[in-house]
């Protein structure tokens, strides 16, 4: 049994949507695939204006610093999830030479939780989801977002195609 399968087996099974969210986001940024792997159908995009402030907020909560100019953003247009080497995801981080590549489902380009989650991977320069950073310090998981960020109504909506 893979580590991801073991992790998924320990997740609470409250609803099919929750499990889908957990699977999508937990797998979303766990790849360190070679830079030659690019998500099928993805295209380069210019960072949205708010990305710089989201990067700063992610640096502040994590206590880490990084070079925003080394981020490369890609989208898979018009979708809420996409297939990647690690499964069906809403976002994916990997190294692309000296840059950090973040690929997002097009419907999530302006979703702060998803974008900052991938940014945190770039700052950590690693896959996996250390609780200290993703939950305790930054609240960048579906379960921790609302409580950590004083948001009512839970995490941003998870669209399904």
Image (cartoon, rainbow, N blue to C red):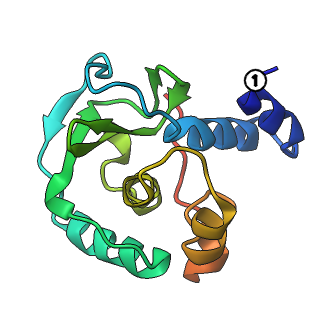
> Quick one: which residue is furthest to the top in this view?
40
> Quick one: which residue is furthest to the front in this view?
98
Does residue 5 sit above or below 51 in this rendering?
above
Give the total number of marks visible in the rendering: 1
Question: In the drawing, does residue 139 fall left or right of residue 72?
Answer: right
Question: In the drawing, does residue 133 fall left or right of residue 65?
Answer: right
Question: In the drawing, does residue 84 fall left or right of residue 34?
Answer: right
- From where the camera sits, is residue 148 visible? yes
Quarter of the picture containing the N terminus is top right
Residue 90, given in percent of the width and then of the height, sits at 46, 38
Residue 159 or residue 101, whichever sits in front? 101
Which residue occupies 86% across, 34% down?
Answer: 9
Residue 16, given in percent of the width and then of the height, sits at 77, 35
Q: Quadrant of residue 25?
A: top right
Which residue occupies 66% across, 74% down?
Answer: 136
Does residue 91 sit above or below 86 in this rendering?
below
Q: Quadrant of residue 27?
A: top right
Q: Secondary structure at mark 1?
A: loop
């Amino acid at each position: 049994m893979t580590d991801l399968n073991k992790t998924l087996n320990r997740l609470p099974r409250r609803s099919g949507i929750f499990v889908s969210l957990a699977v999508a986001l937990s797998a979303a940024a766990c790849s360190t695939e070679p830079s030659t792997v690019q998500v099928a159908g993805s295209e380069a995009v210019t960072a949205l204006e708010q990305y710089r402030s989201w990067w700063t907020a992610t640096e502040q909560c994590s206590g880490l610093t990084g070079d925003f100019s080394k981020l490369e953003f890609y989208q898979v247009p018009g979708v809420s999830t996409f297939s990647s080497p690690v499964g069906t995801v809403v976002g994916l981080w990997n190294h692309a030479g000296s840059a950090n590549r973040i690929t997002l489902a097009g419907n999530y380009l302006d979703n702060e939780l998803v974008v900052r989650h991938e940014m945190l991977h770039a700052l950590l320069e690693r896959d996996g989801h250390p609780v200290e950073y993703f939950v305790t310090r930054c609240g960048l998981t579906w379960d921790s977002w609302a409580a950590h960020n004083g948001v009512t109504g839970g995490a941003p909506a998870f669209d399904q195609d």
